[in-house]
Each structure stands twice: as C-alpha cells, then as structure tokens.
Image (cartoon, rainbow, N blue to C red):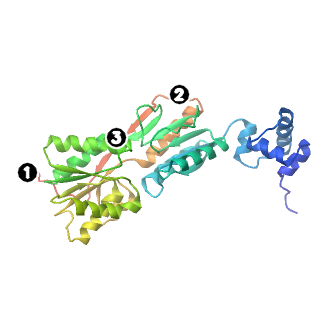
Amino acid sequence: MGIKMTTIRDVAKLAGVSVATVSRALNNSGYVSISAREKVEKAVKELNFYPNEVARSLFQKKSKLIGLLLPDITNPFFPAIAKGVEDCVNERGYSLLLGNVEGDSEKQEKYLRIFEQNNIAGVISAVQGNPINLKNMPFVSLDRINEEQKYVVHSDDFLGGQLAAQAIIDGKAKKVVIMAGPENVSASKVRLKGNKDILDRYAVPYEIFQTESFHLDLAEETAKAVFNQLSEFDSVIASNDIYGLALITEAHKRGIKVPEELQVIGYDDMPFSKMMTPPLTTISQPAYEIGYKGAELLCNVMERDSVTEKRIQLPVTLIKRETLREKDEHE
C-alpha cells in the first residue's frame, strides 16, 4: 500500500471547518475569523500539512521565496543574471519565482501580484524603475539602476562606453556610428556618455543611431536601417552583442568586409560572440556575478546581516577578437 497524502479535506475535517475556509486561510484571501484561523493552523501543524511554499511561509512566519523580475529572457544577458541569482539563493536556502516583463507594465504588475500572493521574502529586479507595490519589502536593483535606489548591483557602464570608443579609435576609425541603446534604460545613457567622452576627446566624427529596444526580434531590421539611413561610416559601436551580430550579418550580405571596411564592437560578451565569423570584439560585463552579488545582497538585507556595501559596481573589460582593425603601434 502507498503512503496516504494528507489533503486539504483532512485539515478541514480536523479543524471542524469547511474546505473553503481552509483554502482562504492558507492563501490569506477572504475573511476568516480568528478562531477559525487558529483551528486551521493547529490542524495544519498536527497533520504536518504543507501543500506549497505559501502555506509553509504562512505557518512558519517566514517565506523562503524570492521574486526576480527580468526585462527580456530572449536576451542572453538576462538568463546569465538569473543563473547567478538562482545559484546564490539556492545556497542560502531560498527558491526563485521568475517574472519576464518584456517591457509590459501590466505584466509587471501581474507578476508583482503573484509575488505578493506567494508571500515572497524579497524582490530582485533588472527592470528599469521602482515597482510601486513593494511597500517595505526588501528590494535590490540590478543593471538598470537609478540614484534613488538604496541597494543596487551593476557594472561600470561609463568605463565600458569609454573602452568601446577607445578600441574603435585604435582601429583607425574615420567616422563612427554609435548604436545607442533605449533612452529609457539608464545603462544605455551612461554608456553613451562614455562613448562620447572618448570620441570628443580625439575629435573623431560620429553619428548617433537611436534604437528603441535590445530585443532579438528587432536586431535584423535595425541593422538594415543603419545601413539604409546612414552613409560613409567605417566603424560601429553596437548597443549589445546581438545587434553587433546583426550588423556583421548585414555587412556580409552587402559585400562589406569586416573589419577591413567596417569595424564593429559589441557589448556584453555573450557566449555566441566568440563563435561568430569573424569573432566579435566586445566589452565583457559580468552578468553572472551581477546576479550572484545582487542575490547575496538581498539575502543579507532580509536576514539582517551586516551590509557594508549597498551600491556595488563591478568592473568591465575589453575582449579583443577579430572585428576591429589592428592598432598601428608606430603611430
């Protein structure tokens, strides 16, 4: 004979209340009298009935769930962040609930309601802005940060922008196109400042091509638009590796040699960038570490451990491959 699983009906029978009352008590929804709730709690403990993490957090008074909001899981940068978050929270005894927002404010609100219904202990977000429904819940922002946020983890986007521009200049750039990331994303604006700082310093002419998204499904169309709308450029600073790949692919279709006639630098150093033809020169930012450090920071805040650094900035590095022309060491 198999082991009989305790059910919600068993809890209702022992507590002397209806199944509906037990359900409302477990999910903390709807009216439940104090006496009925006490009976349900007593029955749950006697039967050792924990149907899910919600019930466990309700009766142990401590949730072991953490919510993670991501802007776009089709962008390889964000799954790498999620992996870092997952590894850290699992090590600390927590589980993860993931919400893929995709730039949709209604979806974000929906996920926040789901987080609230599951009695999560804290939220980590790589989505731009501050969720308005978090109240006093512990919150850490990743990558897309602002000055008002108390706990953040991000990479040095200004330095990243500078490194990309300097690498392009070292490849003897004559006219540069900067594919600026979405204006509503803080990291994009900071990188653009870094790009312009170096290009202006060396008086290298450039044009800014403003993109609306980092989304994979818009990369090919955007790359075509760069070539169709702009002319006489020999270098492109791409908004990320996905758009760098799209630019190189479009250049190949048009018979433009990379890097001899067009040099391209990406951003993020996603795994596919080194498998491209030619392999993409890019700026590496530590996506996994951003996620891991962010989760570590949140857990320390939730558990009231000592937090010595509330705003963590991680370094970026230039990864030289084959899409930039060689620097003339004699110049």
Q: Which residue is mark 2?
A: 306
Query: Relative to the observer, which residue lies in front, 247 or 109?
Result: 109
Q: Vertically, is 236 above or below 14? A: below
Density class for disc 2 (Cα within 10 Å; few <14, some 14-19, many ≥20) is: few
Task: Where is residue 133? Give x, y as percent.
Answer: 57, 37
Does the rendering let one see residue 168?
Answer: yes
Mark closest to the chain's N terminus, 3 or 1: 3
Vertical relation: 247 (above or below) 125:
below
The spot of residue 46 in percent (x, y) is 86, 42
Query: What residue type is disc 3 on?
Result: Asp
Q: Earlier in the sequence, mark 2 or mark 1?
A: 2
Percent across and percent down for residue 246 are 32, 63
Confirm or deny contact between disc 3 and disc 1 (CB under 8 A).
no
The residue labelled by disc 1 is 330
Look at 88% across and 63% down and name the residue there.
1
Distance from Cα at disc 2 to Cα at disc 3:
24 Å
Q: Secondary structure at mark 2?
A: loop
| Pointer 1 local density, CA inside 10 Å: few below 14, some 14–19, many at least 20 | few
Do tag 2 and tag 1 residues touch (Cβ < 8 Å)?
no
Q: Amino acid at mark 1?
A: His
N-term mark: 2 or 3? 3
Task: Name the residue tied to disc 3.
Answer: 156
Q: Residue at coordinates 76% horizontally, 49% vertically from top-left?
A: 51
Is residue 173 visible in the rendered structure shown here? Answer: no
